[in-house]
Image (spheres, helix red, strand yellow):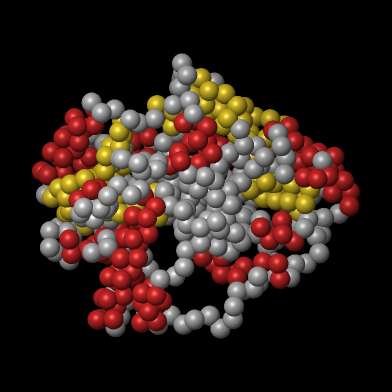
Amino acid sequence: MGDERTESDLRVVGMAPYRWGDPAHPVALPEAAAAALVHLGVKPPEHEPVAPERIALTPPALPAAARAALEAAVGAEQVDDSDAARIGHTRGWSTPDLLRLRAGEAADAPDVVVSPGSHDEVVAVLKACTEHRIAVVPYAGGTSVVGGLAPVREGFAAVVTLDVRRLDRLTALDEVSRTATLEAGLRGPAAESLLAERGYTLGHFPQSYEGASIGGYAATRSSGQSSAGYGRFDEMVVGLVLATPRGTVELGRAPRSAAGPDLRQLVLGSEGAFGVITSVVVRIRPRPAVRVYEGWRFASFDAGLAAVRRLAQDGPLPTVLRLADEAETAINLADPDVLSGASGGCLATCGFEGTGAEIPVRRSAVAEVLRAAGGEALGEGGDGRVLGMRTGVEGGGHGGVDDVARGSGDAAAGAVPRVARVRDGRIVVLHRRVCANRRPGRAVAHRQGRGHRGDRCRRRHDHSSPRRRHGPPRRLRHRGRPARHRGPPGGQADV
């Protein structure tokens, strides 16, 4: 690994309204990308984006009695109806969400943002909102991409966003049982940093890692890039605490139980239907001493799918297992033709994390399966031919980006400059192909429409079920039906 940063080295990113990425590290659109967009028929916007401070909002509709009850629950300083707070908690981070805000449309803005600092204060807020018929939208990272933060006002006096970011502590760590108790507002990088201080990792790295929260992970049954090895987030949860308008629900006393139904499974993935998750007890692992990533080429997506299915069903499983279809492989490599000199084919990425002694054994067993299935080994990340993995190890841009292996002879300069170089490189490749063909082709259109064969492999999205991708989201509110607790965004899934 050399001096490369890991996920534990990243800081929490406070994303600006209607923009993905870290405001401290802005990324300019490369000239090649702008030229490619022109050839694709994309026109410049007719108007400049409306600055957040110029977005017009309707006056808050929160009744005075309800505001007094909320202030009594959390303190007046934690009840904020300023325009900045309301716009900053409007919708999530999907493309439609961002475009509507850029156009100055913020009709979904909450009337007030309430920031409790403890579980008891969350319960008090829910009780107050129930008594005054106020709809509640739980909020932490705010990285929803499926409409989970858009409220329904009909039948309610007002809308309150319940921001749990102040619940951001590691409250317990049991080194004997290897479990940790994390509060719901703790963001992914902060959780990893706290655990790393004790020599542990959670091992959960979704695309939205830099902005997502522990509570969002649990409320959406989050899946991340290392879920093949570490498991989905719901599989890590040993216990949880749920705040409801009628009090507290504590679930889970041990990792396994033979006594009746497991009610944890009712809450995990419920997205706020039964209350607000305020803390979870999760399994943790020792930080890996070694991380190795390698690539394999398959002649077709079907061949690659058969290979990774065999690993998933019969083992052995690497920590990271990803399969890209032909189009995704083409646009994710700076030069797709390096795949054995062929422009076609699919790329599978395998990552191994653990001790120095076990990794060679696991790699050898996985290689035997992939080679028998027709795979061609491309080597480790250092040879310049292999697409690495989607990670958050980057200063700017999306919270999860394509990390591509170094070119031959490139020094161990770290992940950040490497990602930037390869991203610019693949844009140049795309530009060259578009200019030659005068049409988008599969390289940019492969995700649209139905029947994309990559969907057969991408059934576990990072933060949302595929069935929730289409159609209007459900709107669940308090008085027995609390608002959805939607976490970070989904994206490309791990196999």
* Place of residue 469 in the rendered image (x, y in percent of width and height, measured from the top left): 47, 58
- Determine whether 457 is above or below 242 in the image: below
Quarter of the image that includes the N terminus: top left
Measured as percent of width and height from the top left, residue 381 is found at 24, 48
Query: 1 or 100: which is nearer to us?
Result: 1
The image quarter containing residue 421 is bottom left
Q: Nearer the viewer, residue 139 or 253?
A: 139
Vertical placement of 209 versus 99: above or below? above
Decide which of 37, 179 is in the foreground and name it: 37
- Relative height, residue 352 to residue 485 (above, below): above
The answer to which image quadrant residue 62 occupies is bottom right
Residue at 19 percent across and 30 percent down: it is 361
Rendering coords of residue 475 (x, y %): 63, 54
Q: In the current view of this chain or complex, which residue is farthest to the top?
A: 176
Q: Residue placed at 30% from the left, 47% from the top? A: 412
**Side of 406 relative to 71 (left or right):** left
- Left or right: where does residue 491 sit relative to residue 365? right
User: For the point 54% across and 67% down, which residue is it?
Assistant: 96
Where residue 112 appears, as percent x and y from the top left, is 76, 54
345 horizontally vs 114: left or right? left
